[in-house]
Image: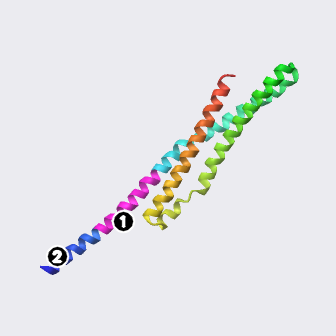
Amino acid sequence: MYKLTLIVAGLLGISGVLWGCNSGKETVKETENEVFAIHDEVMPKIDDIMKMKKQLKQRIALLDSLKTTGSATAAVRTDEEKEQASRLSRNLIVADSLMMDWMSHYNGDTLTKLSSDDALRYLSAQKDQISDVKTKVNTSIEQAKQYLGKK
């Protein structure tokens, strides 16, 4: 009876360890899926960034041409508007660069080489980074849309 108890306890212990490993791997996979859900939400917006940059570039060119034909007062307003358009364009460039940097530095291949705890720490940091990218992408697009919509 004692041997049977030890065998059962041993099997339960092994299954608990295996379940714990599988649970850790499942948690890592779920967390990685969360990270990529954010990425997949943001990635299509890169096209919007490119379109907005092009529209802002065209607006800046128009402002340059208006400046040469307008009064001194109009030139000051044109300079201010051009500065705003340039700033918005730079914000779009930064948001695009952050996305490209995140994608080039994400290293999901190493997740299998890390312990579950280390993999989760890595993914938590990645989730924070891609969430920050999402915020910057969305904000830069929204600001550019507002600017271009009122012109």
What is the crowding at mark 1: few (fewer than 14 residues within 10 Å), some, or many (at least 20)? some
Badge 1 element: helix
| Tag 1: amino acid | Cys
Towards the viewer: 83 or 151 = 83
Q: Which image quadrant for residue 22?
A: bottom left
Residue sitting at x 72%, y 36%: 87
- Image quarter hosting the C terminus: top right
Percent position (x, y) of residue 88? 69, 35
Q: Which image quadrant for residue 4?
A: bottom left
Percent position (x, y) of residue 138? 58, 37
- Image quarter hosting the N terminus: bottom left
Q: Which dot marks residue 21?
A: 1
What is the crowding at mark 2: few (fewer than 14 residues within 10 Å), some, or many (at least 20)? few
Disc 2 versus disc 1: distance between alpha carbons? 24 Å
Q: Main secondary structure of the magenta part?
A: helix
Is 84 left or right of 145, judged from the image as shown?
right
Circles 2 and 1, Cβ within 8 Å, touching? The answer is: no
Is 81 left or right of 132, judged from the image as shown?
right
Residue sitting at x 74%, y 35%: 86
Badge 2 element: helix
Q: Which residue is mark 2?
A: 5
Q: Which portion, as a residue range, is magenta?
A: 16-33
Towards the viewer: 13 or 36 = 13
Residue sitting at x 24%, y 70%: 12
Is 102 left or right of 38, judged from the image as shown?
right
| Tag 2: amino acid | Thr
N-terminal-most mark, 2 or 1 = 2
Is 81 left or right of 104, judged from the image as shown?
right
Residue sitting at x 79%, y 25%: 78
Residue 133 within the magenta-colored segment of the rendering: no
